[in-house]
Image (cartoon, rainbow, N blue to C red):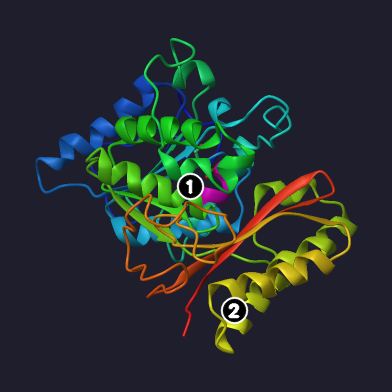
């Protein structure tokens, strides 16, 4: 399908650096045709490809992922951005219908972010060889309806976000693995804002030997500290102000660690801020291993120690003796909007 947006076209074979094109693929065939251009060029040296998976309603946090993807693939490479509000990761009563869908603005934003230095407008050339936007419908993603074979995301998916949203990560893992197969990237970039999603995707790629490198990208914040999220659009002005309690709680946890607190002390410092904040209903404040999601604070949040081998730099010599950064993860409801935020914190 040809784009109803700037620079729309299926790119010619091997776009020259700095003369990249934008392709919007709505079907699997259109995506395959767009990727086949890289595959043909591949025989003459390889076209590096990175994917950024999104649900659209793109903001600067997504654009940071895209910028890092562009840096990795270089001027002749291909960046694939997928835009799909995945029904499998929403439970009944969640915001599947209300989730913002802004495809045209998203493609405009991506084109602007990837514009070559010196490019004049959105019709100008890209800093990468090609941008492919894959925006399927649910029928395209799941042509036979509910997939028969399902991904079990394992124990990490049962705690914290998984305790409140028990089917969420299975739906995420299903779509992420399917999109990896459809887009076949060398790199897939994921934001640290969804720390539990990142840990599950890393574990899935490791355990299922998926040939892709997962690249984490840091959390983008508004000037006042609020972590960027497409769901911030649901907040009223008063709720947005109240939501700042999450980033203040992270700062309190970090400060406690600097003053010598252990994992339990970091958690207490953050929780105190959240509990004092008006209009903020705390779901959890947890300190866990960022890879295994083993509980480090003794609060019974996260997985029990010993049930999963920590996969990263953290070694457990006891319930709160980690070596390397710990993850302070928060979730709270502000009005009807559930917000999450987190920080990696070094304990002394
Ligand atoms: O993080 C998200 O936006 C989604 O969970 C993802 C990875 C695009 C899968 O639908």
Tell me the CA gap for discs 1 and 2. 22 Å
Residue 226, visible in the rendered structure: yes
Residue 223, visible in the rendered structure: no
- Magenta span: 107-111
* Mark number displayed over residue 254: 2
Q: Is residue 217 above or below residue 97?
A: below
**Residue found farthest to the bottom:** 259
Determine the main secondary structure of the stretch shown in magenta: helix
- Residue for point 58% across, 26% down: 87
Which comes before the other along the chain, label 1 or label 2?
1
Label 1 Cα crowd, 10 Å radius (few <14 / some 14-19 / many 20+): many
- Residue for point 74% across, 32% down: 98
Instruction: Identify the residue position indicated by label 1 in the image.
Output: 197
In front: mark 1 or mark 2?
2
Q: Is residue 239 above or below residue 253?
A: above
Rendering coords of residue 215 (x, y %): 36, 57
Q: Per the image, is 183 magenta?
A: no
Rendering coords of residue 102 (x, y %): 65, 37
**Residue found farthest to the top:** 144
Please state if 162 lies on the left or on the right of 10 as rendered: right
- Residue for point 83% across, 62% down: 242
């Amino acid at each position: 399908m040809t784009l109803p947006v700037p620079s729309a076209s299926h790119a010619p074979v091997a776009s020259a650096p700095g003369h990249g094109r934008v392709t919007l693929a709505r079907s699997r065939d259109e995506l395959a045709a767009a990727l086949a251009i890289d595959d043909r060029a591949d025989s003459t040296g390889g076209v590096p490809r990175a994917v950024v998976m999104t649900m659209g309603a793109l903001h600067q946090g997504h654009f940071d992922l895209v910028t890092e993807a562009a840096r990795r693939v270089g001027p002749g490479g291909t960046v694939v951005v997928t835009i799909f509000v995945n029904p499998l990761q929403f439970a009944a009563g969640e915001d599947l219908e209300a989730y913002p869908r802004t495809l045209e603005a998203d493609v405009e934003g991506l084109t602007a972010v990837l514009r070559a230095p010196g490019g004049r407008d959105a019709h100008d050339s890209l800093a990468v060889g090609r941008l492919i936007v894959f925006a399927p419908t649910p029928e395209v993603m799941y042509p036979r309806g509910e997939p028969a074979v399902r991904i079990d995301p394992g124990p990490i998916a049962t705690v914290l976000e998984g305790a409140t949203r028990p089917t969420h990560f299975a739906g995420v893992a299903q779509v992420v693995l399917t999109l990896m197969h459809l887009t076949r990237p060398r790199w897939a970039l994921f934001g640290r804002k969804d720390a539990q999603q990142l840990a599950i995707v890393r574990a899935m790629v490791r355990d299922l030997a998926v040939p892709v490198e997962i690249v984490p990208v840091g959390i983008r914040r508004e000037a006042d500290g609020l972590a960027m999220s497409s769901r911030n659009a649901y907040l009223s002005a008063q709720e947005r102000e109240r939501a700042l309690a999450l980033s203040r709680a992270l700062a309190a946890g970090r400060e406690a660690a600097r003053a010598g607190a252990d994992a339990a002390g970091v958690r207490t410092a953050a929780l105190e801020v959240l509990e004092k904040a008006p209009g903020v209903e705390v779901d959890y404040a947890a300190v866990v291993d960022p890879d295994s999601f083993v509980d480090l604070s003794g609060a019974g949040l996260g997985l029990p120690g010993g049930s999963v081998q920590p996969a990263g730099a953290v070694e457990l010599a006891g319930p709160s003796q980690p070596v390397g950064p710990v993850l302070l993860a928060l979730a709270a409801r502000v009005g009807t909007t559930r917000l999450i935020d987190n920080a990696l914190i070094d304990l002394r």
